[in-house]
Image (cartoon, grey):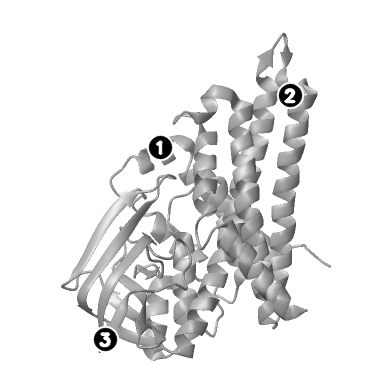
Amino acid sequence: MDFAYTSEQESLRDSVKRFVEREFDWEERFRIIRSTEGVAAGHWAIFAELGWLGAGLSEAAGGFGGGAIENALIAEELGRGLVTEPFIAHVVATQLLAAIGGDVVADLIAGLVMGEKRIVPALQEPVGRGDWRLIETKAEGHVLNGVKSLVEGGATAEQLIVSAQDGDSTSLYLVDLQTAGVTRTIYRTLDNRRVADVRLDNVSGTLLASGPEADAAINRAVEHGIVALCGEALGVMDTALWTTRDYLKVRKQFGTAIGNFQALQHRMADMLIETEMARSILFHLLGAMADGDDDARAAAISAAKTQASSGGIFVGSQAIQLHGGIGVTEELNISHHYRRLYVIARQFGDVELHLARFAESVDRLV
């Protein structure tokens, strides 16, 4: 198997890496997360100008001809810098619209790719605890009632793509956040991202898809979102690993660098193993995304998400332990890596949910 990226994909990675180094150093990140918006003015326009917002979308869907690999590469480099822009939400939104298709959707995608529109998915609800398949929001005659939780990018979005139960089937609606009956509560999560809970009280929405078409669109979009999220987790884990290695080389106890202590070297080895497992299983997942077998793809997605969650928590917690007391301080970057990994572990379902989905998918394959 060839795990080498193409020259175009390497150029894409380099462009994201340069952005993080130039525009998102640690002091700038502190300024951004302490601001009211939690994101920097102008950064999203840079994303659009550099082509990242359409890099993971096929040309037929209105993108620049890429796919899951491009989104994972972008997310991995953004993860290294703990960039707070809602890129994962953008991936899900564009994939939702691409799966639906049509002239109206094409105009929405064009606006998203150009950075002119801010549309984010609202698929999760309090009852689901990360499971996007549990929906209590009701739709009757295009009128929506319910609550959507943890809407990433909801603080700056103009419109939402809302999942709802319409009788016995699932539907997707486009909802303007300025519509009467929409109440948006914006708050900060543990990792300093801004999300929103959105209450819909007799809100009129525009129907985008219903029935099997809506279910297929949601499944496809969430799959791509999880791929990008696993890429981001890898970037955060890798940075936490080598940041900790560098600290152990300079921190001294008993007249020697603590990195010379065998017990700490063993911990670092365990962190490296978890990080490389996350990398390997991400490669496997990217291969499965190009495969036509739904069950094999579902199994690979849940396996990757499980490793990103459990491995990420392990790497983040060990990094804090090896830094000692300063590891939990706000001023040290390692605590922020752990916080992001903790949140990632619960996005799109936790370990228990994905272990169950993995088992179900494998049973169908046997």
Q: Residue at x 56, y 59 (%)?
A: 229
Label 1 crowd (10 A; few <14 / some 14-19 / many >=20):
some
Q: Residue furthest right?
A: 1
Give the foreground label among 2 and 1. 2
Question: What residue is at 42 percent from the left and 90 percent from the top?
Answer: 102
* Secondary structure state at the residue bearing disc 3: loop
**Does residue 270 lie above or below 292 as drawn?**
above
User: How many other residues sit within 10 Å of disc 3, few (<14), some (14-19) or many (≥20)?
Assistant: some
Please name the residue that numbered disc 1 is placed on: 30
Distance of label 1 from label 3 (alpha carbons): 42 Å
Say whether residue 238 is left or right of residue 90.
right
Q: Please provide percent x and percent y for residue 137.
A: 32, 75
Q: Disc 2 marks which residue?
A: 259
Please tell me which residue lies in front, 177 or 310: 310
In primary-sequence order, the first of circles 2 and 3 is 3
Residue 158 image point, x, y percent: 28, 68
The answer to whether 322 appears left or right of 177 in the picture is right
